[in-house]
Image (cartoon, coloured by chain):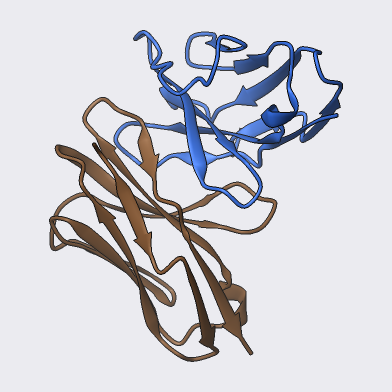
Chain colours: A brown, B blue
Amino acid sequence: EDQVTQSPEALRLQEGESSSLNCSYTVSGLRGLFWYRQDPGKGPEFLFTLYSAGEEKEKERLKATLTKKESFLHITAPKPEDSATYLCAVRYYGQNFVFGPGTRLSVLP
Amino acid sequence: GAGVSQSPSNKVTEKGKDVELRCDPISGHTALYWYRQRLGQGLEFLIYFQGNSAPDKSGLPSDRFSAERTGESVSTLTIQRTQQEDSAVYLCASSLDPSGAFFGQGTRLTVV
């Protein structure tokens, strides 16, 4: 069964403490892996799309990487405003987006 | 418009009533998705429209749920005879294949 998992479920960091979030998937025929940020009471906000193993994308303190079976979202020197739930999703040919359960990130000042 | 627009933003309804939720996708986006998110939970896929193809309805939880889309524009999600377990945020997203999907702010549905 096609599946997307994320770890850890929750992560607490001190401001400036870098870390990584993991997204693993078992879908075949991947047509893209997507990272989103979701703040409480809001819809997910699109961050990155990755299409092939080895690809990397960066935005401010965030960097997403992709291998054949997983993706990492690296957060460098996080700030409290980076606190949110980070979702990854995969899309395979002709199908909708399958979302992982998310990682709740808290960055303490 | 600039983004995906959903209305209403909040809806309180009595158990047994029908509700209709509206989604205006980003202009030109051929794909449109509906998801449900219960409090503290992940996104649950409901239905997916892609151009003029038959929609993927595999995520609809029961025959009380239905959705329509007119061409590549507005979509409505209808829930008939609402139940308390239908209480959730209903999220709509649109995309231009194969890019990522852009979400609206959701409709918070409360069934009392």
User: In the image, A5: left or right of A29?
Assistant: right
Question: What residue is drawn where x is 13% and y is 63%?
Answer: A54
Of residues A55 and B27, which is closer to you in this image? A55
The answer to which image quadrant residue A48 occupies is bottom left
User: In the image, B13: left or right of B63?
Assistant: right
As drawn, A62 above or below B63: below
Q: Quick one: quadrant of the N terminus of chain B?
A: top right
Residue A63 drawn at (x, y percent): 33, 71
Residue A11 drawn at (x, y percent): 49, 76
Question: What residue is drawn where x is 34% and y is 40%?
Answer: B99
Question: What residue is drawn where x is 66% and y is 14%?
Answer: B78
Count of number-bearing discs: 0
Q: Quick one: quadrant of the C terminus of chain B?
A: top right
Residue B82 drawn at (x, y percent): 74, 18
Residue B28 seen from this side: no
As drawn, B23 above or below A82: above
Question: What residue is drawn where x is 60% and y is 46%?
Answer: A43
